[in-house]
Image (tube, rainbow, N blue to C red):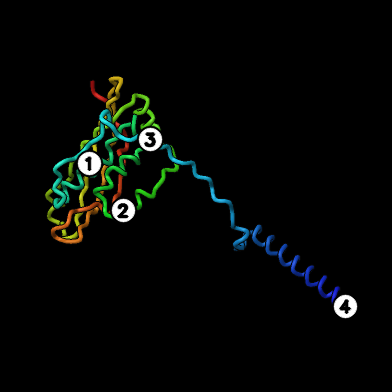
Amino acid sequence: MPRTRVTALALALALALTLAGCTRAEDGAAPTPSATRSTPPVKAPAASSRPLDGDAHVPSPRGIDERNATAVALAWAELSYGYDTVYDAHPHAATLRAARYLTREKAALEKSYSPAAGPGAQWNTWAGHRAWTEANATLIDADEEARTDESTRALRVVSVDGKAHGRDGWKGPGPRLHAYLTLTNPGKSAPWRVHEISIIEAASTPTRRP
């Protein structure tokens, strides 16, 4: 058989196999890598928050005993849910302010995170009133938690019942949730840091009393 005909047959066979592979992928068989490759979605950049100044209403915990797991848990919660919508473009801005109370690994994760979605309807309500929030954080079952502490690991459940204050005089509900926290420290004299966080938001928001 002439060389040119062999070459033509080889090309035809390769083309047939390629088309058959594409058909199998479309019929539900395991697709090839080329069949599954797609252009990654474009992620819109998150809006930037404003630098804080003297007019900002955000918590600034002082005198925290960082060798006390409960004190660190409460300080983290108050910072994490103390927003000022005039300065913060997204709730994550407060999360970053609270990163001082996170372990190095957890803080790195939070700093690398970029919110893909908007802050939500409640945030938009606060922002419409140029509001800030106060996060009243309290410990749940303090005695039981203290009894189960280990030397380098502690569990805390913190309840947050927040209030929002608008610069136009409006008042409304703030963040409401339970935070289940695992805190760790590398040694007896080291400060406690939040390592794991699980949040359960309140199912409903209470009606504001006059």
Q: Which amino acid, mark 3?
A: Ala
Where is residue 34, by image quadrant? bottom right
What is the quadrant of the C terminus in the image? top left
Q: Which amino acid, mark 4?
A: Pro
What is the spatial separation of the Cα atoms under label 4 and label 3, in whole angstroms?
A: 72 Å
What is the quadrant of the N terminus in the image? bottom right
Q: Nearer the viewer, mark 1 or mark 3?
A: 3
State if disc 4 and disc 1 touch (CB < 8 Å).
no
What is the spatial separation of the Cα atoms under label 1 and label 3, in whole angstroms?
A: 24 Å
> Vertically, is 32 above or below 5?
above
Return the mark for residue 2: 4
> Vertically, is 75 above or below 171?
below
In percent of width and height, residue 113 lies at 39, 48
- Which residue was labeled with disc 1? 159
- Which residue was labeled with disc 2? 106
Q: Which amino acid, mark 2?
A: Lys
Return the mark for residue 89: 3
What is the spatial separation of the Cα atoms under label 2 and label 1, in whole angstroms?
A: 21 Å
Residue shown at 18% from the left, 45% from the top: 140
